[in-house]
Image (cartoon, rainbow, N blue to C red):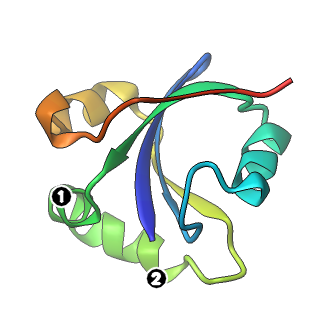
Amino acid sequence: MKSLLLLTASGPLLILTSHESLRDPKLLDVLKEKGIGKFVAFEVPVSVARERYGGHFHAVESNLHETDDLRVLDFNGQRVFQLFRFDELGAPILQEQR
């Protein structure tokens, strides 16, 4: 499982995904279907996201199965930016699909 912070045109999202990589074509297709084709992403350590979100993380995680591509953990950009420091995030990944 991966936890990813996506900076999108409509705002930040924190997602959980069962895909091993953000570069997985199936995950990119799912994001594109949801209107997210261009974004900057940062991997968030799952342990840190679990700690910061507590019971909410557990509820979202328990609904993530191998057949599910992703779940949104948080779509409140202000909260996401308050919960995570930049030095806790992985290197930025730039993605642009046409």
What amino acid is found at the position of numbered circle 1 in the picture? Val
Question: Alpha carbon of mark 1 to alpha carbon of mark 2: how far?
Answer: 17 Å
Which residue is drawn at the image coordinates 15% and 63% (left, top)? 51
The percent position of residue 70, horizontal first and vertical second, equals 61, 61
Q: Quadrant of the C terminus?
A: top right
What amino acid is found at the position of numbered circle 2 in the picture? Ser
For numbered disc 1, what is the local secondary structure?
helix
* Residue 51 in the image: above or below residue 85: below
Which residue is drawn at the image coordinates 40% and 56% (left, top)? 3
Instruction: Say whether disc 1 or disc 2 marks the residue closer to the N-terminus.
Output: 1
As drawn, is 80 to the left or to the right of 13? left
The percent position of residue 52, horizontal first and vertical second, equals 17, 55
Q: Which residue is mark 1?
A: 48
The percent position of residue 39, horizontal first and vertical second, equals 59, 25
Q: Quadrant of residue 46?
A: bottom left
Which residue is drawn at the image coordinates 55% and 76% (left, top)? 64
For numbered disc 2, what is the local secondary structure?
helix
Q: Which residue is mark 2?
A: 62
